[in-house]
């Protein structure tokens, strides 16, 4: 065993995150670490990589006890981690981020030439197109994720820990990362792979460990002998059957039959360099998918409606006071006009990380209630927040916990609860189920169904063609800033979406 943990335990305040866990990883194998949101996966890998000290238990590296005081110290022993909530420096460039653990020096100076030479093959292998001196903050979430992976790879790790490394990547990038993982395995690296994409796990992993409530319920099982239902059952325990049924219930919503009057309309919207002449309509109660590759402009459609991008020409008509809303500018005005935005990049726009869960949930609704908000007591707001948290299944010790102390998937559920509280008439969602486990995903799809029944207009931009085909009434496809196809009814399938977003490039395998 190259790396093992014995009896690892960790509590945060009164919350027990890990309850005495034994794990072992061997060289030349890809080991999946699975479990529901909040099961303790990130806590375990943070302990393995020196980011968090355990309360109890020990680590063995190559058979001898070790203690890592920091991730930099673990990296020097060639145990590297790609963490779930990326640890990057937005105001520095790609190269500085890749070498954040150890800047190569030439005398007193940082050796940029050496950095470039070391990083170039790694960045090329990962397929990062941005030049190495690009500021990190100007990269997409997916590219930032690639930078974090590059930082781990330049250490030439013997243990590489990946905590949900593909959650912001496009299908092509995911495939490339999986190839790299395969090559590392062949060279004898021990890879620890945390993911909610169970199909990927079955495709690339050799061994599987499952955590439930901070304890191991399946230990190093042979992946070849497991299938999807077996994984779900191990993860969810007795809750499995219902959740699995719900997760499978993503059969297409079917053509939309409601009336499009009083819905959302975009009329010939153009934004130079981004969108050209985009028109669309979405009716109250409709779930409209917006498909596209990174950079195609599909998320810009959402940003225009959210007031984050101002069209040069054309107009946006919102439900209700459409005309008046057309003159609004800025995101605040959009929120007041009843537009909500849920993004997979929760750190960027979704949450205020150091504020308690309850404040995050009622944040928008208290604002949109305006004067009335002042009369609402804190107690009433907390109670409202608690009801919503329960509805979306946020797992938290208390409503007073700061959001950044929740597990990644639970942070994303807080963003959902926030927008449920605000009762938007238009809900925009950009990869909203990023990092959410299979059971909770089913719950979120069910919530989207409830919102549809209540007449909310929903736009869903997603990198997952199966998700788009599964839950949308219609999907519009954006390529090079233009609407190139509208898929519905029998024409709407995951394969058709994939083909349409790729256009003449042809579709990669699903
Ligand atoms: N810094 C912290 N302070 C308080 N509690 C924490 C902290 N970090 C994690 N926890 C708690 O520990 C438990 C395990 O969280 P962890 O992040 O390990 O889950 P996870 O399995 O990675 O979930 P996900 O799939 O959502 O990423 C959760 O209940 C979480 O709220
Ligand atoms: Mg996690």
Image (cartoon, rainbow, N blue to C red):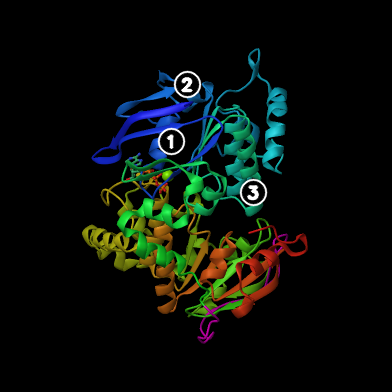
**In screen coordinates, is 243 left or right of 102?**
left
Boundaries of the magenta span: 254-279
Relative to 385, does residue 3 appear above or below in the rendering? Answer: above
Relative to 352, does residue 488 appear above or below in the rendering? Answer: below
The reply to whether the residue tagged 1 has its Cβ within 8 angstroms of ligand 1 is yes
- Decide which of 107, 214 is in the foreground and name it: 214
The label shown at residue 62 is 2
Q: Regarding mark 2 in the picture, which secondary structure is present there?
A: loop
- Decide which of 465, 400 is in the foreground and name it: 465
Q: Which is in the foreground here, disc 3 or disc 2?
A: 2
**In screen coordinates, is 28 left or right of 495?**
left
* Position of residue 66 measured from the top left corner of the image (x, y, whole percent): 41, 20
Q: Which residue is located at x 62 percent, y 53 percent?
A: 170
Q: In which quarter of the image is the C terminus?
A: bottom right
Q: Quadrant of residue 424?
A: bottom left
Q: In this rendering, does residue 263 appear at all?
A: yes
Mark 1 or mark 3, which is nearer the start of the sequence? 1
The label shown at residue 45 is 1
Label 2 to label 1: alpha-carbon separation: 17 Å
- Decide which of 93, 195 is in the foreground and name it: 195
* Position of residue 473 measured from the top left corner of the image (x, y, whole percent): 54, 76
Q: Regarding mark 1 in the picture, which secondary structure is present there?
A: helix
Q: In which quarter of the image is residue 371?
A: bottom left
Residue assigned mark 3: 175
């Amino acid at each position: 065993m190259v790396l093992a943990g014995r009896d690892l335990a960790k509590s945060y305040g009164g919350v027990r995150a890990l309850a005495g866990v034994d794990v072992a990883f061997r060289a030349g194998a890809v080991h999946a670490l699975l479990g529901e949101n909040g099961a303790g996966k990130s806590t375990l890998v943070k302990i393995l990589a020196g980011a968090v000290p355990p309360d109890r238990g020990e680590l063995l590296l190559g058979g001898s006890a070790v203690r890592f005081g920091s991730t930099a110290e673990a990296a020097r022993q060639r145990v590297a981690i790609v963490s779930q909530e990326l640890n990057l420096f937005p105001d520095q460039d790609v190269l500085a981020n890749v070498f954040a653990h150890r800047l190569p020096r030439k005398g007193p100076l940082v050796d940029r030439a050496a950095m470039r030479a070391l990083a170039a093959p790694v960045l090329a292998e990962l397929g990062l197109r941005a030049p190495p001196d690009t500021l990190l903050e100007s990269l997409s979430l997916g590219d930032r994720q690639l930078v974090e992976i590059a930082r781990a790879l330049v250490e030439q790790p013997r243990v590489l820990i990946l905590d949900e490394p593909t959650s912001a990547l496009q299908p092509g990038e995911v495939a490339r990362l999986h190839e790299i993982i395969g090559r590392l395995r062949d060279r004898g690296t021990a890879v620890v792979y945390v993911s909610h994409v169970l199909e990927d796990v079955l495709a690339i992993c050799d061994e599987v460990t499952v955590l439930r409530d901070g304890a191991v319920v399946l230990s190093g099982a042979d992946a070849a002998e497991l299938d999807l239902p077996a994984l779900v059952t191990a993860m969810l325990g007795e809750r499995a059957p219902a959740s699995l049924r719900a997760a499978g219930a993503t059969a297409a919503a079917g053509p939309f039959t409601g009336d499009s009057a009083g819905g959302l309309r975009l009329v010939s919207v153009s934004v130079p360099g981004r969108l050209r002449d985009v028109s669309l309509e979405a009716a109250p109660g409709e779930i409209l998918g917006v498909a596209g590759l990174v950079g195609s402009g599909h998320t810009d459609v959402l940003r225009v409606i959210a007031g984050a991008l101002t069209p040069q020409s054309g107009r946006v008509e919102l439900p209700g006071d459409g005309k008046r809303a057309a003159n609004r500018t800025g995101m605040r005005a959009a929120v007041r006009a009843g537009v909500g935005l849920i993004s997979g990049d929760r750190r960027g726009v979704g949450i205020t990380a150091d504020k308690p869960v309850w404040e995050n949930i009622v944040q928008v609704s208290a604002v949109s209630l305006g004067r009335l908000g002042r009369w609402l007591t804190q107690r009433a707001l907390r109670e409202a927040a608690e009801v919503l948290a329960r509805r979306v299944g946020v797992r938290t010790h208390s409503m007073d916990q700061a959001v950044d102390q929740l597990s990644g998937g639970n942070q994303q559920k807080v963003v959902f609860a926030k927008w449920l509280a605000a009762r938007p008439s238009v809900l925009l969602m950009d990869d909203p189920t990023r990092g959410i486990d299979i059971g909770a995903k089913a719950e979120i799809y069910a919530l989207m169904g409830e919102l549809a029944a209540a007449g909310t207009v929903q736009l869903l931009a997603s990198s997952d063609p199966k998700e788009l085909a599964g839950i949308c009434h219609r999907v519009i496809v954006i390529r090079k800033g233009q609407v190139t196809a509208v898929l519905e009814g029998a024409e709407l399938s995951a394969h058709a979406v994939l083909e349409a977003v790729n256009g003449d490039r042809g579709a990669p395998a699903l």
